[in-house]
Amino acid sequence: MDVGDVSIATQASPRRSLRFGVLAVVALSAILGGCGESPPGGTEALEGSDLVAGTSLFRHGLLAIPRAGGVAELRAIEDPLHVRWRGELELPASVEARPVGRAVVLRSEDGELSLYTPATETLRSLGPVPATARWIASAEGGAFVARDRATVVRPGAAREVTTDGSFVWVAPASSERVVALVETGSGHRLDVYEEAETPATSATVDSPGPVLLTGSGREVLLPEGEDGRLVERSLPELTATERFSLERRPTLLAASPSEHRLFVAIGGEDRLVTIDRYGWERLERSRTEGSVRDMRSSVTGDLLLYADSTGVWAVDPEDPSPVAIESDWRADLPLALPGGRVLGLQGGYVRVFGPDGEPGDVVPDAADAWWLPVRWRPRAIEVLTERADTTGERSGEEEVGERPAAFQAVGLTTMGQVSGRAVAAAPPPDRADRFLEEEEAASRASSRVPNGFYAVATSSRQLPSLRELQRSLEGSGYPTQVLPRVDEANETWYRLLVGPYETRDRAEAAASELRRERGISAWIQEVSSGVAAPGGR
């Protein structure tokens, strides 16, 4: 396998192997059963660490949905001209489309919401929202907000919450939790909703926003006071920890996919501030041509796109000199692509801009579609099929199923048509989202990890206790991975890795910080081609 390949391997006991074998077929049916024609090159493996975002291994693509209605297309995020999959379900016309993880919420002209899940080709009605409702995106989904009411949307469901004041910001957090910033007659407060209709926790805050959901849905970050102190509050307790002083209140906040970097637009100043969330240190100050009015971070890297009074710009934290992108700014475009490129809208045409801002290839017939970054579960199965001939009999077929790593390593493949040999029935539509969530959770414990150097925080046979430490480290801004290993006695051990880092020195610095601030005796491990070097536990 090439070094750039990202693969998945599973090691398990014979009993677990049987379970995974059954799940693999069921998962394939659930995900691909409703899909249409297999796309050209639909079984090729995706490559490159640029497709890894955050602390989990997800595959990303660009979903193109016709505004006037029609079937969706999934295009390669590294090459938007390449169609990987084409649906069969006729989608309604929409005046708004927003990505929510692996699904998309569509809004019709009369305000009706629908949740479209491309992996299962299902469309679920979510009911209407007022014409004045505005969309607020977050890491866990988003919400349509209209004064005292909000429709909160997750990949698998929607929920309505109300308040006695006026919603400023609303976001779904972990599980059934919803967090909101509310404006009242006496000031602002944060409310945390659990399953009940009334807030379970509230706290008065000296802040009109902006607000950012961080820590994988376990904290909120917002400026408090006129001096712009960035305060992180835990969920659901809302315990406050002051993190950083900006000296002036920010107007916009954004985060990189891993939440390693925060991007801050300062009110009344023509500059962007980049903050390292590891040590809460200022990394860069990028001068802008005017006050920043909107910004959008990449789903596959740290590239930030923003719009100011002079136009659209792209900035890389490693090279803080902004690059001009001659693109219009709308709800879905421009979008950052891997390798520093940008998908933008110029003169009525959707085209790919190079890292230097130069316009490149035009994507044919693309301007009248919504362009939405989506993700889907990585535990895919390669299914290589040849089309049936006109008599209906198959002229040939080869099938590769997901099996324990002792037999093979399964690459990340694109979506495609289910083989006629799949013998397990797909879960009914109302179970599909829950099944996908369970499989995503399982995949995070068995995925190969990106190449690089890591600080190993701990090694344990008890995955739940290791997850507690992982959540704690992620909440402090550390990127983490979980790597399973099988010892000589065929027992599975799990290593909690912090990283990856490009050099051993950077990993050593992270290990020193863990020892100094956490009392964790971390050691260094290098991962190459997605696999750790042989060693102990």
Image (cartoon, grey):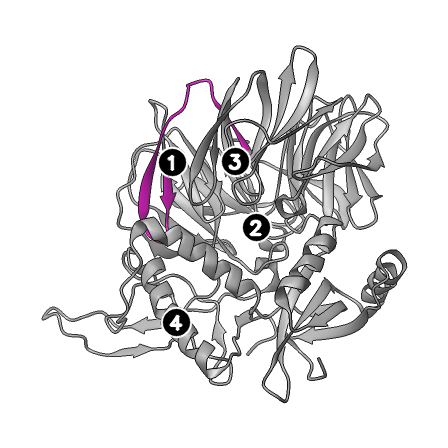
> Residue 535: x, y in percent?
71, 84
Camera-side mark, 3 or 4: 3
Q: Secondary structure beneath disc 1?
A: loop
Q: Are marks 4 and 1 in contact (CB under 8 Å)?
A: no
Q: Which residue is mark 3?
A: 142
Regarding residue 367, the answer to whether it shows in the image is: no
Q: Which mark is residue 368?
A: 1
In three-dimensional space, the C-alpha distance between marks 4 and 1, rounded to whole angstroms, equals 32 Å
Q: Nearer the viewer, residue 28 or 266?
A: 28
Q: Which residue is mark 2?
A: 337
Residue bounds of the magenta highlight: 114-136
At label 1, which amino acid type do we have? Asp
Side of 215 where 402 appears, left or right: left
Residue 317 vs 408, above or below: the answer is above
Location of the C terminus (image quadrant): bottom right
Camera-side mark, 4 or 1: 4
Q: Residue at x 31, y 51 (%)?
A: 429
> Residue 207: x, y in percent?
73, 23
At label 4, which amino acid type do we have? Glu
> Residue 250: x, y in percent?
75, 27
At label 3, which amino acid type do we have? Gly
Binning the other alpha carbons within 10 Å of mark 2 as few (below 14), some (14 to 19) or many (20 upward) gives many
Residue 384 vs 254, above or below: the answer is below
